[in-house]
Image: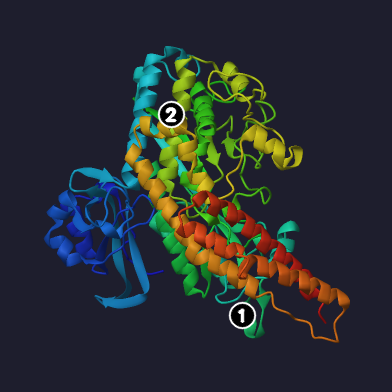
């Protein structure tokens, strides 16, 4: 840590005079970077000398800085033939300074790291239309707040179930969000033993255990740093994945592979999304200083617990008296689980989840995490608790209801399916539109909490005014133990098996896609742009990364035994392995391998076939690796 360096400039200091004064006092902030977020969640990062910013501060604050639109992913909106995009500073959120601790300079007799002021920015196409992830979230927040105010005013029956005397009591609707970041850390260039990881996970040897060595130091340093920035760290701890590190001569550690989680305080949605993105950078920077790699992959090791980013959503009202009250909590928590607004939000989240899922999980890596087991949230279902007096602790469901009768403002929903790489801006926007849809339906029908409890607790054959027949939406049991896979698919909806299947949900459920558009957050063009970007990423990753990696996995399954000193079982097992490897990766005159078929399907844009072949090939490779592990264990 360094003394007297700038960490954050809050919104109230974003005027010209304040910025000039602050940056004049902190010469270590040598650059600014306008940070726009495209439709795929990528952000811009450049270095503009502070002097240039100061010389044209009025112009930058009001008109932004132009960039090349082809450098951001906005397909169908801004491409190489129509690439004028402007980055306009967002003055409503915190601006954080990114310090480069590998670049230390003397500033007035004090050594300080050179810093870059990262300024969140809205992307504007052709100086006429705001585009990208930030504006979609901004639109969603505005639509949700406006919708809630109108509904409370139009349906006075709600006052019986909310801590309000009149709709006019509401001064402002407040939204709160936060994410819980899970990630793996490891020593570079060392490969973790999958069997050890799996065994350690099953024995729960790592969960909430004491950290040691460089992992402990880096974790503690990260928590202190995040507090310096004002993120309000709540805790950092070990997660279920990982193995105990090995100590080598001199007290150093090797073969580190541990899963960690860091949580921080809530903020309004845009700030929460900014915090999520910024904190990922800081986590990586600190752990790198201690010789550790960080991965935010959803499933870095198959067969071992993946990393999630549980996303929390809450709503409250600030009254004209200054008091803040929950809009989701029940007015009488001894009688009801939630208010009508709370039930409506939860029901909307569940009913429309099929078009939230592709936004949260649009990659093969994300889908690899969403498999039954490993506590993966794969089924569209919630848990309220066995009775109104007992809050739910069921973590096998997709959406958790977090409630404490003594703390109504803590009432919120926890969506468990996003992963560390999910675009939080769009996830929050989609959730808000889905929740608003449910609220409009429930309040429009003037349903009471008791009636809504019956709806969300309905049987699969029951008809409902809003929820779908043939589905159930509430379970107070472990759904992985009390339901078969076939029952889960029938009752909770089939889980997409590939990224292509997930992205196609926009076309399979047009009425649910319309909820995102009609709610006012997304436009039809935004949806098409997102689909195009997500599909392009899936195709490129599958063709250029996953297929070559699978081919290398096959190549590693080489013959280990020597003729004459092996058992007949070794010969038999290896012959089976050779046949499997040929099916997966070797072409002949008469037969094309699975990997070649997959590559050709992608090249021919036959994505349905490619999706099917991706599943078949992944299963075959998994069978091959299992057979090879059995074979290799018998070689002396």
Mark whose residue sits in front, 2 or 1: 2
Say whether residue 20 is visible.
yes
Q: How many marks?
A: 2
Q: For the C terminus, which image quadrant?
A: bottom right
The kind of secondary structure element at disc 2 is: helix
Q: Is residue 332 left or right of residue 13?
A: right
Residue projecting furthest to the right: 568
Report the Cα–Cα distance between label 2 and label 1.
Answer: 53 Å
* Image quarter of residue 249: bottom right
- Neighbor class of circle 2 (other Cα within 10 Å; few <14, some 14-19, many 20+) is many
Residue projecting furthest to the top: 157
Q: Which mark is residue 252?
A: 1
* Image quarter of residue 29: bottom left
Viewer-proximal residue among 539 and 181 = 539
Q: For the N terminus, which image quadrant?
A: bottom left
Which x, y percent locates residue 493?
Answer: 61, 36
Residue at the spot 46% in from the left edge and 56% down from the top edge: 604
**For mark 2, what is the residue?**
436
Residue at the spot 54% in from the left edge and 69% down from the top edge: 548
Residue at the spot 43% in from the left edge and 38% down from the top edge: 430
Would you place residue 303 above or below residue 392 in this image?
below
């Amino acid at each position: 840590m360094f003394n007297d360096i700038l960490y954050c400039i809050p919104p109230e200091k974003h005027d010209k005079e304040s910025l000039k004064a602050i940056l004049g006092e902190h010469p270590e902030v040598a650059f600014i970077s306008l940070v726009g977020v495209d439709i795929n969640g990528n952000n811009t990062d450049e270095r503009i000398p502070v002097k240039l910013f100061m010389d044209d501060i009025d112009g930058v604050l009001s008109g932004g800085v132009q960039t090349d639109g082809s450098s951001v992913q906005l397909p169908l909106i801004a491409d190489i033939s129509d690439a004028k995009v402007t980055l306009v500073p967002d003055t409503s959120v915190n601006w954080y300074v990114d310090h480069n601790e590998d670049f230390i300079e003397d500033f007035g007799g004090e050594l300080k790291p050179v810093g870059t002021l990262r300024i969140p920015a809205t992307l504007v196409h052709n100086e006429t239309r705001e585009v990208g992830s930030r504006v979609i979230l901004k639109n969603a927040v505005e639509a949700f707040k406006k919708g809630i105010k109108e509904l409370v005013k139009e349906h006075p029956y709600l006052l019986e179930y909310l801590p309000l005397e009149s709709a006019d009591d509401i001064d402002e609707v407040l939204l709160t969000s936060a994410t819980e970041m899970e990630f793996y850390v490891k020593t570079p260039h060392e490969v973790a033993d999958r069997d050890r990881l799996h065994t350690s996970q099953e024995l729960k040897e790592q969960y909430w255990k004491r950290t040691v060595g460089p992992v402990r130091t880096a974790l503690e340093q990260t928590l202190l740093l995040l507090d310096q920035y004002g993120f309000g760290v709540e805790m950092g701890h070990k997660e279920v994945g990982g193995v105990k590190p090995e100590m080598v001569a001199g007290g150093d550690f090797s073969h580190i592979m541990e899963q960690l989680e860091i949580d921080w305080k809530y903020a309004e949605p845009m700030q929460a999304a900014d915090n999520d993105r910024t904190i990922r950078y800081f986590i990586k920077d600190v752990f790198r200083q201690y010789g550790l790699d960080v991965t935010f992959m959803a499933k870095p090791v198959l067969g071992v617990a993946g990393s999630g980013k549980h996303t929390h959503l809450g709503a409250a009202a600030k009254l004209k008296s200054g008091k803040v009250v929950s809009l989701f909590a029940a007015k009488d928590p001894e009688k009801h689980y939630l208010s009508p607004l709370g039930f409506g939000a939860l029901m909307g989240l569940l009913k429309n989840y099929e078009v939230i899922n592709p936004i949260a999980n649009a990659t093969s890596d994300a889908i690899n995490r969403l498999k039954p087991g490993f506590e993966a949230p794969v089924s569209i279902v919630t848990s309220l608790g066995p009775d109104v007096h007992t809050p739910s602790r069921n973590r096998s469901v997709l959406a958790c209801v977090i409630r404490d009768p003594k703390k109504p403002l803590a009432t919120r929903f926890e969506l468990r399916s996003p992963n560390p790489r999910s675009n939080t801006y769009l996830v929050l926007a989609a959730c808000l539109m889905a929740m608003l849809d449910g609220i409009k339906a429930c309040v429009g029908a003037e349903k009471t909490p008791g009636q809504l409890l019956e709806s969300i607790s309905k049987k699969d054959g029951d008809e409902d005014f809003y929820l779908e027949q043939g589905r159930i939406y509430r379970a107070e049991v472990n759904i992985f133990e009390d339901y078969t896979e076939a029952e889960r698919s029938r009752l909770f909806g089939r889980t997409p098996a590939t990224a292509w299947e997930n992205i196609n949900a926009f076309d399979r459920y047009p009425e649910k896609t319309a909820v995102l558009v009609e709610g006012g957050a997304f436009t039809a063009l935004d949806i098409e742009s997102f689909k195009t970007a997500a599909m392009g990423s899936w195709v490129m990753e599958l063709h250029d990364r996953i297929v070559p990696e699978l081919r290398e996995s096959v190549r590693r399954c080489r013959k280990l035994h020597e003729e004459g000193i092996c058992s007949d079982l070794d010969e038999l097992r290896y012959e089976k392995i050779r046949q499997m490897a040929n099916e997966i990766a070797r072409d002949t005159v008469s037969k094309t391998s699975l990997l070649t078929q997959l590559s050709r399907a992608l090249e021919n844009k036959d994505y349905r076939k490619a999706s099917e072949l991706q599943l078949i090939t992944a299963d075959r490779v998994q069978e091959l690796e299992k057979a090879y592990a059995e074979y290799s264990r018998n070689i002396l």
